[in-house]
Image (tube, helix red, strand yellow):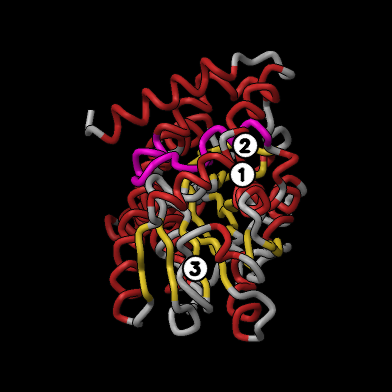
Amino acid sequence: MPALSRLLIAMTMVVLSLTAAPALAQTEISISSWVPPSHFLAKDFLAGWAQEVETATSGRVKFRFLPKMVASPGGHFDAVKDGLADLAFISHSYTPARFPLTRFGVLPFGGDNAEAQSVAVWRIYEKYLASANEHAGVKLLTIYAHGPGIMYNTKRPINRLADLQGLKFRVGGGMAADVGQAIGATVLQKPAPESYELLSQGIVDGVFFPAESPVSFKLEKLLKYATEFPGGLYSDTHAVIMNEAKFNSLSKSDQQILMKLAGEHMARLAGKAWDKYGALGETAMKAAGIQVMKAPDALVAEVRERTSKFEADWIKEAAAKGIDGAKVLAAFHEELKKLEAGK
């Protein structure tokens, strides 16, 4: 056989072998977000984390944000469980009866630093409360906390609880709703994205939100007053969850990579984002002319008195599930103290 013919045959066999080689296995994970794409939880936190996973898996795991949310904000747990989306974050405050044990991390005056609080919440939840399996039906990737809750309104400065008379506030539910009711405010439980409509139409006079939210939801031109409390008036925890079947479809090695980047690492990413955008929100509020004030000592004392029962209530609720709630809270406060001190 002539040399040229042998060369052509060899080249053909190489091409055929390359064509027949199996394509790189790739899994696409769909993400449903109930905040707008411009919100930092979508564009910075989730998108940034997704890129980390894609890089660490050499592109075997890819993520795609769905063009619109697949359920109401409060319906995302079931949406992920049922496979309408592969991954989402949920606010525990939207369905508080479903996640009572998460309330240990959202009590009033809990902390001023979202990163420290998020990491502490995850560590304590994983160590003491994960066995209760409140997120059964989905793969729990992490839990984190948002920044300290602030009281905003359009009518007047709040110096005493009596100043709340006649004012109605939008709250997300959970601890924010409980605190609002305890201090005598009239509260309306609605998801965060509805806040602009509620305020602009005069349906509510104010909102309970962390510092970043007025900017994220374009409320800074509607609000006039903000009252900040030491450690926050309340907080909220979010969970990032994944459809179990989708998670199980990944190779064992990719499951391990994803989980290594979940947990505390993911909680810290979320907390850092909350702190970053909280600081930007504080600046934007002042630039918009919102009168930002620290709650007077008398007001703080009134709120502490009205909300002191929540810790005892949680301890009782934990005891009903066989958990030493006092021990858990003590461990949480100790962990938070260490993290806030940079240890």
Can you identify the residue that label 1 sits on? 242
- Image coords of residue 183 (percent x, y): 61, 51
Tell me if I can see residue 333 in this picture: yes
Q: Which comes before the other along the chain, label 1 or label 2?
A: 2
Point 42% across, 35% down: residue: 257
Helix, strand or loop at label 1? It is: strand
Can you identify the residue that label 2 sits on? 139
- Image coords of residue 124 (percent x, y): 48, 25
Pointer 3 local density, CA inside 10 Å: few below 14, some 14–19, many at least 20? many
Q: Which residues are magenta?
A: 100-119
Q: CA distance from mark 1 to mark 2?
A: 5 Å
- Image coords of residue 279 (percent x, y): 30, 62
Q: Between residues 132 and 104, which one lies in front from this camera angle?
A: 104
Asked which quadrant contains residue 335, the reply is top left
Pointer 1 local density, CA inside 10 Å: few below 14, some 14–19, many at least 20? many
Give the overall secondary structure of the magenta segment.
helix
Left or right of 276 in this view: 274:
right
Left or right of 213 in this view: 136:
right
Check the image and report above or below for 267 versus 292. above
Can you tell which mark lies on residue 152?
A: 3
Q: Between residues 265 and 61, which one lies in front from this camera angle?
A: 265
- Image coords of residue 248 (percent x, y): 63, 35
Is residue 113 part of the magenta span, yes or no? yes
Q: Which comes before the other along the chain, label 3 or label 2?
A: 2
- CB under 8 Å between callouts 3 and 2? no
Point 67% across, 60% down: residue: 73
User: Which is in the foreground here, disc 1 or disc 3?
Assistant: 3
Is residue 135 part of the magenta span, yes or no? no
Q: Amino acid at mark 1?
A: Met
Q: Which comes before the other along the chain, label 1 or label 3?
A: 3
